[in-house]
Amino acid sequence: MLDQKIVFDILSKNGVTFFTGVPDSYLNGFCNFALNNCGNRNIIAANEGNAVGIAAGHYFATKQIPLVYMQNSGMGNALNPLASLVDENVYAVPMLLLIGWRGQGDTEPDHPQHKLQGEITPKLLDILHIPYVILSDDIISFEIKIGQAVEYCIRTRKPFGLIVPKGVMATTEKDNSVDDSYPMSREEAIEVILNEMPKDTVYSATTGRATRELFFLREKRGENKSNDYLNVGSMGHTSSVALGIALECPQRNVVVLDGDSACIMHMGAMTMVSKINVPNYTHIVLNNGAHESVGGQPSAGYMVDFTKIAEACGYQTVGKPVTTKKELEEAIKTLKSCGKASFIDCRIRKGLTRKLPPIVFNHRETIDALTDELNRSQR
């Protein structure tokens, strides 16, 4: 991994001192250094398009080149503002785009959700007419490339891409610091939910730790996984998938096991329950106030009043976050037959209770099993 202090010294020397984006495990060295050393010059955004907008505003106010960081999976969120705000034919906004290259070649054979994104990452920049370089673990090369990239941005008023393969800006081990903000762990909360909901409940688990912990809890409990949708990619969309299921399967309880960062990323999805009747739909945010899967950087989860937002969007709630097993049990009992879509902000502590391996499963077989189960139950 590149020495991140030197990385930031080089960026500063080239006039790049403002950073915004969404944390990525391939960039966790970079993201954590920015978090610990850059104060309000580092803004963790709700999503990648949000970050591009913030960066554009920074440039308009200062004429200084910002840097936007993201996993390549987030390029889709950034595509619209890059094409319709930043482009030279619109407002011509220069910025550096630091992009973690998940799915490069055959580096992640057990994670097919990154395969196509990895393949098209350079091609998307080509389509956007954004030049790029692929970084390596060589600080001399990095300094040369940053100098050239910034010079290009200043000269042309256009963005420049910095594609980051595995190991260049990330430590080999992710942070698993456990705090004591709240008594429940994520795994404990999921187990309470499994215990309190009917056995045939359909679960839609969000990207990251929730999918992994649901998967291994099923194995630990000797339970079938055919009622589970594991949203291993498409961060922020697990609640939308669950809503589509709930609409077509009104006789089945459908529970979203969401994350605070994922929910924030596409929070507009919460408004859908104001327009449609889905009393079998329960949206639970497992809120640990962090982007835990990619390095533990803080989210806005603990600072946002999800309960009031949910109520304003049309959900039934218990009026406050739940923080203990007993409160979670009581909230589920109160809401599961309330006659309308329901929402729980479940405050949990950051960190894993046990070390879990990555989940390895056949995605097509798994989704076909869920599809067969859902169609069978409607006959």
Image (cartoon, rainbow, N blue to C red):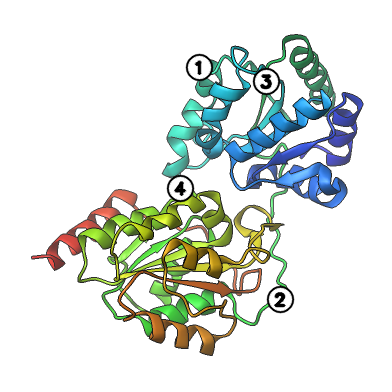
Sort mark 2 into few (<14), some (14-19) or many (20+) by Cα contacts within 10 Å. Answer: some
- The answer to whether residue 93 is left or right of residue 64 is left
Relative image position of residue 176 (x, y in whole percent): 69, 64
Q: Which mark is residue 233?
A: 4
Sort mark 3 into few (<14), some (14-19) or many (20+) by Cα contacts within 10 Å. Answer: many
Kindly check if marks 2 and 4 are in contact, taking CB atoms under 8 A apart as contact.
Answer: no
Q: Amino acid at mark 4?
A: Gly
Q: Amino acid at mark 3?
A: Pro
Count of number-bearing discs: 4
Q: Earlier in the sequence, mark 3 or mark 1?
A: 1
User: Label 3, label 2: how many angstroms apart (C-alpha)?
Assistant: 40 Å
Q: Amino acid at mark 1?
A: Ile
Camera-side residue of 332 and 194: 332
User: Label 3, label 4: how many angstroms apart (C-alpha)?
Assistant: 26 Å
Camera-side residue of 76 and 46: 46
Q: Which mark is residue 159?
A: 3
User: Label 2, label 4: how many angstroms apart (C-alpha)?
Assistant: 28 Å
Provide the secondary structure element on which disc 2 rests.
Answer: loop
**Residue 220 in sight:** yes
Residue wearing tag 1 = 127
User: Label 1, label 4: how many angstroms apart (C-alpha)?
Assistant: 23 Å
Q: Amino acid at mark 2?
A: Ser
Q: Earlier in the sequence, mark 3 or mark 4?
A: 3
